[in-house]
Each structure stands twice: as structure tokens, then as C-alpha cells.
């Protein structure tokens, strides 16, 4: 879960792995009769680009999901 004022660091998600699936909630919205979560899914992968290690982020979907 992402938190307000806390940076998103993909390298922390990898934690020594080459690739991880991402499924994070980036925002919440509540109304009188429902609540929603903005969900981000995808992959983070370590790659070598121009002879430098880097992280490739591929977001496969971003959507509002009704929770109740």
C-alpha cells in the first residue's frame, strides 16, 4: 500500500530479486454509499541499459475498484 508523503521506491520491492509483480493501491475515494481504491498492477524488473543497472517499470493496468 502506498502512503501519503512516502516515496515509491521500486528497488525496495525487488529486494534482491530480478523481477516482481506489482499490485499497489495508490489512492482511496469514499462516498456515502461506497468506497473505491485506485489500483496499479504491473512488473518491476532489473535490467542493464547503456551498461548501467536500472529498473524497468511496466504498469499493465491502473483502475478504480469498488470495494463495497
Image (tube, rainbow, N blue to C red):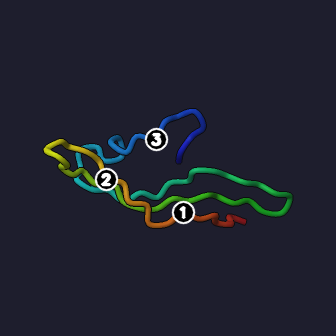
Q: Which label sits on residue 56?
A: 2
**Alpha carbon separation for disc pair 3 and 2:** 14 Å
The image quadrant of residue 3 is top right
Against 44, is 52 above or below? above
Screen quadrant of the C terminus: bottom right
Looking at marks 1 and 3 on the same chain, the residue that comes earlier in the sequence is marked by: 3
From the viewer's perspective, tell me whether residue 34 is left or right of residue 28.
Answer: right
16 or 55: which is nearer to us? 55
**Secondary structure under the numbered disc 3 in the rendered image:** loop
Q: Residue under label 3, please give it.
A: 8
Identify the element where label 2 is drawn.
strand
Residue sitting at x 64%, y 58%: 37
Residue found at the far left of this picture: 51
User: Residue 61 versus residue 34: which sits nearer the camera?
Assistant: 61
The alpha-carbon separation of the residues under discs 1 and 3 comes to 16 Å
Identify which residue is drawn at 20% across, 49% down: 49
- Residue at 61%, 58% (x, y): give it: 38
Q: Earlier in the sequence, mark 3 or mark 2?
A: 3
Residue 53 position within the rendered picture, expressed as x and y whole percent measured from the top left? 20, 43
Give the side of residue 10 with respect to residue 46, left or right: right
Q: Are marks 2 and 1 in contact (CB under 8 Å)?
A: no
Are the residues flagged by discs 1 and 3 in contact, CB closer than 8 Å? no
Nearer mark to the viewer, of 3 and 2: 2
11 over 35 or under it: above or below: above
Marks 2 and 1 sit apart, C-alpha to C-alpha, by: 17 Å
Residue in front for this viewpoint, 43 or 32: 43
For residue 57, side relative to residue 46 (left or right): right
Q: Residue furthest right?
A: 32
Amino acid at each position: 500500500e502506498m502512503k501519503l508523503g512516502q516515496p515509491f521506491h521500486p528497488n525496495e520491492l525487488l529486494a534482491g530479486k530480478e523481477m516482481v509483480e506489482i499490485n499497489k493501491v495508490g489512492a482511496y475515494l469514499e462516498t456515502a454509499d461506497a468506497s473505491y481504491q485506485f489500483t496499479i498492477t504491473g512488473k518491476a524488473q532489473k535490467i542493464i541499459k547503456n551498461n548501467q543497472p536500472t529498473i524497468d517499470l511496466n504498469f499493465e493496468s491502473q483502475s478504480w475498484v469498488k470495494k463495497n
